């Protein structure tokens, strides 16, 4: 993969990871808190926690191991994209940490 | 410079009638101008039409403010008031904000990127006419005294036949869905144009920042509009056919409409804001005299906003009884989006600080944007907090917030853009003196109107009420807000006067009148219709600042690729989507009526549906299909090579993943997948929230479900094999495989229908949604059948030469996407069967 393509992937990648993580957390909350009651609350916490750790690791990649070559603007964009989406993943997970049940 | 002076004989290449560059690109004269496909013409039409809708919607807003100017007013009756505020919101959001910004993008993107036109000019014309006809359908509701009155969000159950038995809601659903075709087609067109037609050397990192904003916005439209299109179709189906998607008694859910609407509605705010912010990011460096601070930061911020804005939709639904955990998730995302927005604003402030800004009229509007939008953003963060949101919900505080965001974030930059790019439309400058008056009238009027509304809302005044009693603390605030709205309107009226005045008396604009850095100012502002005689290699994001050779000569003498290439065809350069390296020559269509006829056929179909004249509806459909077939029946020029100058020889078209048509197909698949995903979301939502009623549905048949899945796989595989043989030049085999693809598509559609035979779509919402999914997949399968047979027919008619395998290449991608949809649909049917219906 060419350096410019790699740095572009590092800009877009964290966004895709955030989107998948958001959808996962939303789906888990829907599974636990809707009338069908598919999973229990501890199950929600466990799976949500695992998804968060995984997503956070991926989002932080461009921050901790930034692309070595490529246009400097895109390398900078990759760093900030990774940082912003890492925060956003944590914010998604915040809902799971601060509440003890679907009702709060 | 080596250029081909005369058309060289080459197999498969069609020659035009006139080889003069100017004649080839000339805009048709007289009434034939309606057949123009040029991005300059289509972009301007979007802008002018959008502005007319803005003026109409503005008049409606003045009616609203006049009604509320004093307590107990009876200027408008209640019914008319509902119609007026509904149409105000509808026109502003659907027919003004997005189309006018797309118009600017359609006009500016090729000029900024060094392309001679957009890549799919006919699609642009088709989109424009869909927008125009859709807008006329919506507006014509006034003539029939059937203007929609259910709010611009058309909430159910208010908009169902039980509570809106007349056709006012149908006008909204059909007209808006039709007009939205324009947004989606423009999105595909812009994505492809930005990725595939840039000047040599313009990598993604060297693109003007405006192109990044538009690229992300176009992707957002491609993903964000489908949920509303699906929602509108489902609601219209409920109204027309009695399918109970939103009826709780049959397992439907009114909240499903809100989810689908706001899945579109919230990203739409950013879809409106981002292009306007892109305009600011383009204009600001010009007046500061320094490049945009933090290009990389801005790109990261725009990408982040593009993603995160899809995680906010439910903050419009905080008062609907969603689980607290869900509220917290959406509250967090709503707060998080402030981070990239803030990064962007700081980039603008840092740019301001990096030079000595010239306080021109566009600059005033930029400063106005910064002040107003930041305030709107701050109240947005307040509303992201659930407890505050519950207090302020449906009050005038929210009205104030949304106008601060939308007028501050979009209208002020837009007016700045009018003053900045006015020379492109008339060749003349607008008045600086009048411009300052326009700005201050609008700024003072706006803040008088909407700043006070925060207080009105905090004092408890709800939205959408037609009048109010006196003496409860709302009287004076409403009076002042109404006066402010008149001042704001005076500013807009003065602008309109300035435009007409400048057409006769405005000073003629010189080349690059503002001293800007981007390529749209390379030529004198008004040209007969062409963009670049030669497409210059670009080494910088500010080419007119950093490459002085571009402005040293007359524009038509500037060196560049394709200078002097005379095929008598409209042509531009196709490039590598990432690096911007020139890859091929892109041949573009000349003026044609076909897209307009296709749009007119669709308008007839939609209009006849409204009037319940179904034979006319079918006729409209047939006209549209016939037009699409003529559109597609075009000889291919692939396989021809031309000398484009500067020592470069390029082929015409590229049979490759980087080809513009393939990128366009991928963009289209993105839209189709988003439509499909919206339906799947609806299915899972109803299954999850209405388990008892979903369980009463009869199970789909197992064997046909399995057959459908297998046939879906066959569609994908045959499509891929067709591509394989076409690339090898084995035309006969490719034609056979194309026919097999069509047969597999027919079989999978039939199997899916067979599987669902026991399911009564009127009995349960879940069943109706399964049928809707099958219907959607069936439409895609019909496209596969039509396309595959069309490709086969071209081969059998001897219209396909060696190396002309692009249609098969593209069909394979479409067939794989459709095959995937069939397999997923079949899997859901099978899951319903194995799980004992929908238990």
Image (spheres, coloured by chain):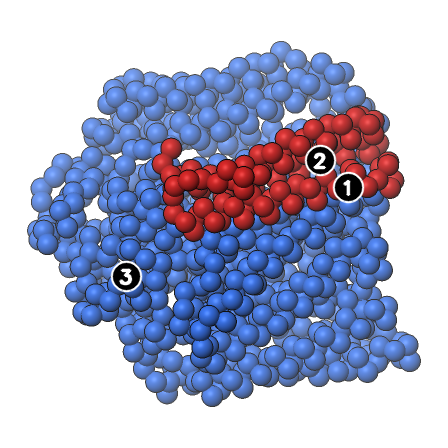
Chain colours: A red, B blue
Horizontal side of B403 relative to B192 (left or right) equals right
Q: Residues within 10 Å of mark 3 (few under 14, many from 20)?
A: many
Picture quadrant where residue B339 is located: bottom right
The residue closer to the viewer here, B31 or B643, is: B643
A67, above or below B160, in the image: above
Q: Which chain contains the residue that carries disc 1?
A: A
Q: Secondary structure at mark 2?
A: helix
Q: Do the CB atoms of the residues marked 1 and 2 lie less than 8 Å apart?
A: yes
Q: Which mark is residue B531?
A: 3
- x and y percentages locating residue B724 in the rendered image: 32, 21
Residue shown at 74%/49% (left/top)? B331
Name the residue tied to disc 2. A25
The residue closer to the viewer here, B392 or B184, is: B392
Do circles 3 and 2 both sit on a common chain? no
Calculate the distance from the C-alpha at mark 1 to the C-alpha at mark 2.
Answer: 9 Å
Q: Secondary structure at mark 3?
A: loop
């Amino acid at each position: 993969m060419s350096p410019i393509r790699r740095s572009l992937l590092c800009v877009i990648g964290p966004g895709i990871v955030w989107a998948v993580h958001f959808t996962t957390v939303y789906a888990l909350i829907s599974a636990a808190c809707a009338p069908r009651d598919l999973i229990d609350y501890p199950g929600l916490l466990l799976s949500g926690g695992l998804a968060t750790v995984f997503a956070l690791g991926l989002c932080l990649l461009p921050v901790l191991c930034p692309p070595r070559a490529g246009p400097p603007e895109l390398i900078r964009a990759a760093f900030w994209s990774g940082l912003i989406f890492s925060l956003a993943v944590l914010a998604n997970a915040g809902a799971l940490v601060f509440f003890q049940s679907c009702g709060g | 410079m080596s250029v081909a002076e005369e058309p060289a004989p080459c197999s498969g290449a069609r020659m035009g009638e006139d080889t003069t560059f100017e004649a080839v690109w000339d805009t048709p004269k007289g009434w034939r101008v309606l057949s123009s496909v040029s991005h300059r013409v289509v972009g301007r039409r979007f802008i002018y039409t959008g502005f007319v809708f803005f003026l109409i919607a503005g008049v409606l807003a003045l009616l609203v403010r006049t009604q509320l100017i004093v307590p107990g007013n009876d200027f408008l009756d209640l019914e008319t008031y509902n119609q007026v505020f509904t149409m105000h919101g509808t026109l502003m959001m659907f027919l003004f904000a997005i189309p006018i910004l797309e118009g600017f993008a359609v006009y500016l993107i090729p000029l900024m990127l060094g392309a001679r036109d957009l890549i799919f000019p006919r699609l642009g014309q088709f989109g424009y006419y869909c927008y125009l006809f859709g807008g006329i359908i919506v507006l014509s509701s006034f003539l029939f005294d059937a203007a929609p009155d259910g709010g611009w969000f058309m909430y159910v159950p208010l908009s169902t036949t039980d509570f809106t038995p007349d056709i006012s809601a149908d006008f909204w659903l059909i007209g808006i869905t039709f007009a939205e075709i324009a947004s989606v087609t423009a999105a595909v067109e812009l994505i492809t144009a930005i990725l595939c037609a840039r000047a040599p050397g313009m990598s993604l990192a060297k693109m003007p920042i405006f192109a990044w904003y538009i690229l992300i916005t176009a992707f957002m439209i491609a993903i964000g509009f489908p949920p509303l299109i699906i929602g509108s179709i489902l609601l219209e189906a409920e109204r027309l056919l009695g399918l109970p998607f939103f009826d709780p008694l049959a397992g439907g859910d009114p909240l499903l409409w809100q989810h689908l609407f706001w899945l579109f509605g919230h990203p739409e705010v950013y879809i409106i804001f981002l292009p306007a912010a892109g305009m600011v990011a383009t204009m600001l460096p010009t007046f500061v005299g320094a490049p945009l601070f933090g290009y990389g930061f801005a790109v990261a911020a725009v990408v982040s906003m593009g993603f995160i804005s899809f995680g906010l939709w439910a903050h419009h639904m905080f008062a609907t009884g969603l689980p607290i955990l869900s509220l917290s998730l959406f509250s967090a995302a709503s707060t998080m989006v402030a981070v990239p927005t803030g990064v962007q604003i700081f980039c603008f402030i840092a740019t301001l600080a990096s030079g000595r800004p010239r306080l021109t009229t566009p600059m005033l509007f930029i400063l106005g944007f910064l002040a107003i939008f930041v305030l709107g953003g701050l109240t947005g963060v307040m509303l992201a907090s659930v407890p505050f949101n519950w207090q302020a919900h449906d009050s005038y505080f929210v009205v104030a917030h949304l106008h601060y965001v939308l007028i501050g974030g979009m209208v002020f930059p837009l007016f700045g853009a009018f003053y900045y790019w006015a020379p492109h439309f008339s060749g003349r400058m607008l008045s600086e003196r009048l411009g300052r008056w326009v700005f201050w009238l609008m700024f003072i009027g706006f803040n008088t109107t909407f700043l006070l509304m925060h207080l009105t809302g905090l004092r408890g005044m709800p939205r959408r009420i037609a009048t109010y009693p006196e003496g409860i603390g709302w009287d004076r605030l409403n009076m002042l807000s109404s006066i402010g709205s008149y001042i704001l309107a005076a500013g807009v009226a003065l602008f309109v006067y300035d435009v007409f005045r400048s057409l006769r008396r405005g000073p003629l604009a010189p080349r690059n009148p503002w001293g800007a850095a981007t390529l749209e100012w390379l030529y004198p502002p008004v040209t007969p219709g062409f963009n670049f005689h030669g497409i210059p290699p670009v080494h910088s994001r500010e080419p007119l600042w950093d490459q002085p050779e571009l402005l040293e000569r007359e524009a038509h003498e500037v060196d560049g690729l394709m200078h002097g290439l005379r095929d008598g065809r409209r042509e531009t350069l196709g490039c590598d989507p990432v690096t911007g390296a020139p890859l091929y020559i892109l041949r573009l269509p000349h003026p044609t009526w076909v897209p307009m006829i296709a749009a007119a056929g669709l308008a007839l179909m939609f209009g006849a549906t409204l009037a319940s004249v179904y034979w006319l509806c079918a006729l409209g459909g047939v006209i549209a299909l016939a037009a699409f077939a003529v559109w597609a029946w075009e000889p291919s020029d692939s396989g021809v090579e031309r000398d484009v100058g500067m020592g470069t020889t390029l082929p015409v078209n590229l049979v490759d993943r980087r080809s513009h048509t393939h990128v366009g197909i991928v963009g289209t698949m993105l839209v189709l997948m988003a439509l499909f995903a919206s339906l799947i979301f609806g299915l899972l939502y109803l299954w999850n929230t209405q388990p008892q009623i979903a369980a009463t549905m009869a199970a789909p048949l197992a064997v046909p479900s399995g057959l459908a899945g297998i046939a879906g796989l066959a569609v994908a595989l045959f499509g891929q094999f067709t591509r394989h043989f076409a690339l090898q030049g084995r035309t006969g085999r490719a034609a056979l495989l194309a026919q097999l693809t069509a047969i597999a598509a027919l079989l999978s559609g039939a199997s899916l229908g067979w599987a669902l035979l026991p399911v009564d779509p009127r009995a349960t919402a879940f069943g109706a949604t399964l049928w809707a999914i099958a219907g959607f997949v069936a439409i895609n399968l019909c496209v596969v059948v039509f396309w595959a047979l069309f490709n086969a027919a071209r081969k059998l008619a001897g219209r396909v030469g060696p190396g002309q395998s692009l249609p098969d290449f593209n069909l394979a991608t479409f067939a794989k996407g459709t095959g995937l949809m069939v397999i997923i649909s079949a899997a859901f049917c099978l899951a319903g069967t194995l799980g004992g219906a929908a238990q």
